[in-house]
Image: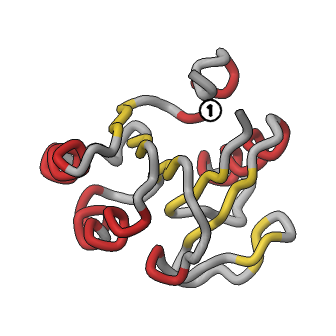
Amino acid sequence: MKETVVVLGASSKPDRYSHKAMLLLQEHGHTPIPVHPKEKIILERQVFADLSELEVQVDTVTVYVRPDLLSQQLDDLVNLHPRRVIMNPGTEDAGVAAELRNRDIEVVQACTLVMLNTGQFEN
């Protein structure tokens, strides 16, 4: 199943993991939606300044922001109603994870790049 995937903390810098995730998501046929407060275009895709601007059904949110920034966006994240949220290494927040699980949103603590490269993303 191909997914619509929000990349929270997307970057136009090729050395950033969030940028690599955007590329790999595209290669695997998924639709990445970049979210970053200052970027405008990443990989020819419109960038949304924050989660509240999104008006599409989202399957997965993959997180590339610090825990303190993630916790500030908890309400907007919950309002998206994604099927799952992937907390990449360094983004984990136990409080956010607990609240998402309380809202029946799956939380995965893993690397999106590894998941895509090993076939675990689609499971």
For this view, does 52 lie left or right of residue 106? right
Q: What percent of the width, then of the height, locates residue 31? A: 74, 53
Look at 43% across and 42% down and name the residue there. Answer: 84
State the image quarter where residue 101 is shown.
top left
Circle 1: residue type: Leu
For this view, does 72 lie left or right of residue 19? left
Look at 13% across and 50% down and name the residue there. Answer: 95
Query: From the viewer's perspective, is residue 70 above or below residue 95?
Result: below
Say whether residue 114 is visible. Answer: no
Pointer 1 residue: 113
For this view, does 27 lie left or right of residue 7? right
Looking at this view, name the residue that lies furthest to the top: 118
Q: Quadrant of the C terminus?
A: top right
State the image quarter where residue 29 is shown.
top right
Q: How is the image coloured?
A: secondary structure
Q: In which quarter of the image is the N terminus?
A: top right
Question: What is the total number of numbered labels drawn onto the structure image?
Answer: 1
**Callout 1: few (<14), some (14-19), or many (20+) C-alpha neighbours within 10 Å?**
some
Q: What percent of the width, then of the height, locates residue 9? A: 51, 63
Look at 70% across and 61% down and name the residue there. Answer: 13
Say whether residue 39 is visible. Answer: yes
Q: What percent of the width, then of the height, locates residue 90? A: 35, 43
In the image shown, does 52 or 21 lie closer to the viewer? 52
Dot 1 falls on a residue whose secondary structure is helix
Query: From the viewer's perspective, is residue 63 above or below residue 9?
Result: above
For this view, does 73 lie left or right of residue 101? right
Query: From the viewer's perspective, is residue 104 above or below residue 5?
Result: above
Look at 69% across and 22% down and name the residue there. Answer: 117
Query: From the viewer's perspective, is residue 87 above or below residue 46?
Result: above
In the image shown, does 74 or 2 lie closer to the viewer? 2
Q: What percent of the width, then of the height, locates residue 72? A: 25, 72
